Image (tube, rainbow, N blue to C red):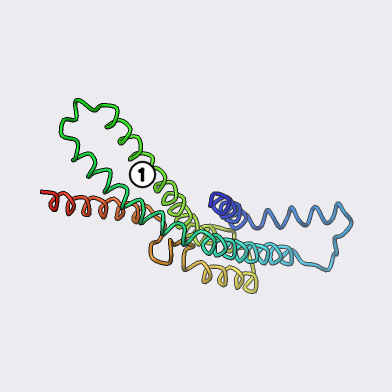
Amino acid sequence: MIITVGQIEILAFNLRNFDKVAERQRSRDVAENKYIEEYPEQYYVRAVLKDCIVHHNCIIRYVSMIESAFSLASALQFMLSVMVLCLIGIQFLSIENPASHPMQIAWMGIYLTCMLIEVFILCWFGDELIWKSTDLRKAAFEGPWMNSDRKTNMFIIIFLERCKRPLRLTAGKIFTLSLDTYTVLINWSYKAFAVMRNMKK
């Protein structure tokens, strides 16, 4: 997921500076004797914007591949994490004299922390993906499109339409990997723990 976030940041940079990227491409073509004088300046700008659209489509396909590969595993991990968090809570309650079992409590605390961090990492990167992909629309709008002609601006409009839905990863097509989902997971764990505690009484 971190690769995807990095690629989105590169794409956002190219969108904000597409005129400079186009000028650099034109200078490179001149240096390599590939420059054709009939090509207007807007030709290179359009070429850069086309590359940005292709880059964005590649990112979308990559996210889709990640989701199809890890979706089921993430869903199972979420469900098992809720169960483990509940069981650790029940085990804490089953210790009658906590002062006489400090090592057991310490190990359970460490295991609980590891489980929470394991799920948090997935949710944090999923949240980053959502926010960075949302930022692409802003990046396209912040670019120097005011200096471009109408035909070139059509590429930006197409890109803006494509970015209306942010990229997101789901766990088993049930949960979206985000910090909101992490909060819901903690709430579920606590509710299940409260039910088990009441049953134990």
Q: Is residue 156 above or below residue 3?
A: below
Q: Farthest left residue?
A: 201
Give percent across and percent down for residue 142.
53, 57
Q: Residue at x 42, y 45 (%)?
A: 118
Give percent across and percent down for residue 117.
39, 42
Q: Residue at x 80, y 53 (%)?
A: 28
Q: Quadrant of residue 23?
A: bottom right
Residue type, mark 1 in image: Leu
Q: Horizontally, is 97 left or right of 146 in the view?
A: left
Q: Quadrant of residue 88?
A: top left
Q: Secondary structure at mark 1?
A: helix
Q: Farthest right residue?
A: 33
Q: Horizontally, is 93 left or right of 160 in the view?
A: left
For this rendering, which residue is in front, 186 or 159?
A: 186
Give percent across and percent down for residue 30.
85, 55
For this rendering, which residue is in front, 172 or 130?
A: 172
For this rendering, which residue is in front, 178 or 14?
A: 178
Q: Quadrant of residue 156?
A: bottom right
Q: Which residue is mark 1?
A: 116
Q: Horizontally, is 142 left or right of 111 in the view?
A: right
Q: Residue at x 29, y 50 (%)?
A: 186
Q: Horizontally, is 9 left or right of 183 in the view?
A: right
Mark 1 crowdedness (10 Å alpha carbons): few <14, some 14-19, many ≥20: some
